[in-house]
Image (tube, rainbow, N blue to C red):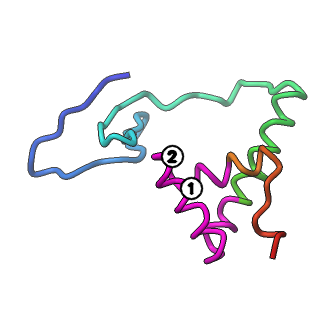
């Protein structure tokens, strides 16, 4: 993975460009990597199960960010732990905490 220093007239770049991916870390640094080729990967049953749980966690986090009450709770927790609210919601899903059903 290469670290990229952008000229001052470019404020930031992220996303896919051809077969490379530009990523911005939480600290604001930009990195460039080659796009992974996952076409030949055969997932084990355990990996597929985890992928499905992660898919559900992402769906929960998106719903939590859309709910004003849950979002406020996650924003407060995130500020205290120097994390992002979306990450806190994903983490909560895996811990079994569900703020959306507590209403």
Helix, strand or loop at label 2? It is helix
Task: Give the vertical position of 6 relative to 33 (above or below).
Answer: below
The answer to which image quadrant residue 72 occupies is bottom right
On the image, the x and y values in percent for residue 64 come to 67, 66
On the image, the x and y values in percent for residue 44 come to 86, 24
Foreground residue among 76 and 85? 76
Q: Residue at x 51, y 46 (%)?
A: 81
Q: Residue at x 73, y 60 (%)?
A: 60
Q: Residue at x 49, y 32 (%)?
A: 35
Helix, strand or loop at label 1? It is helix
Foreground residue among 66 and 17? 66
Instruction: Report the side of 34 relative to 42 (left or right).
Output: left
What is the span of residues highlighted in magenta in the rendered image? 61-90
Instruction: Report the side of 39 relative to 46 (left or right).
Output: left
Instruction: Report the side of 56 relative to 65 (left or right).
Output: right
For label 1, the crowd category at 10 Å Cα-Cα, with few meaning under 14, some 14 to 19 and many 20 or more, is: some
Say whether marks 2 and 1 touch (CB < 8 Å): yes
- As measured in the structure, the alpha-carbon distance from the residue carrying label 2 to the one carrying label 1 is 6 Å
For label 2, the crowd category at 10 Å Cα-Cα, with few meaning under 14, some 14 to 19 and many 20 or more, is: few
**Residue for badge 2:** 81
On the image, the x and y values in percent for residue 24 come to 36, 42
Foreground residue among 1 and 100? 100
**Residue for badge 1:** 77
């Amino acid at each position: 993975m290469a670290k990229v220093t952008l000229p001052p007239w470019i404020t930031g770049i992220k996303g896919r460009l051809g077969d490379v991916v530009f990523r911005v870390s939480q600290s604001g640094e930009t990195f460039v990597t080659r796009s992974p080729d996952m076409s030949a990967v055969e997932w084990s049953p355990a990996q597929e199960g985890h992928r499905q749980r992660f898919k559900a966690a992402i769906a929960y986090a998106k719903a939590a960010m859309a709910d004003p009450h849950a979002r406020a709770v996650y924003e407060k927790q995130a500020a205290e732990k120097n994390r992002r609210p979306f990450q806190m919601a994903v983490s909560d899903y895996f811990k079994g905490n569900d703020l959306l059903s507590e209403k």
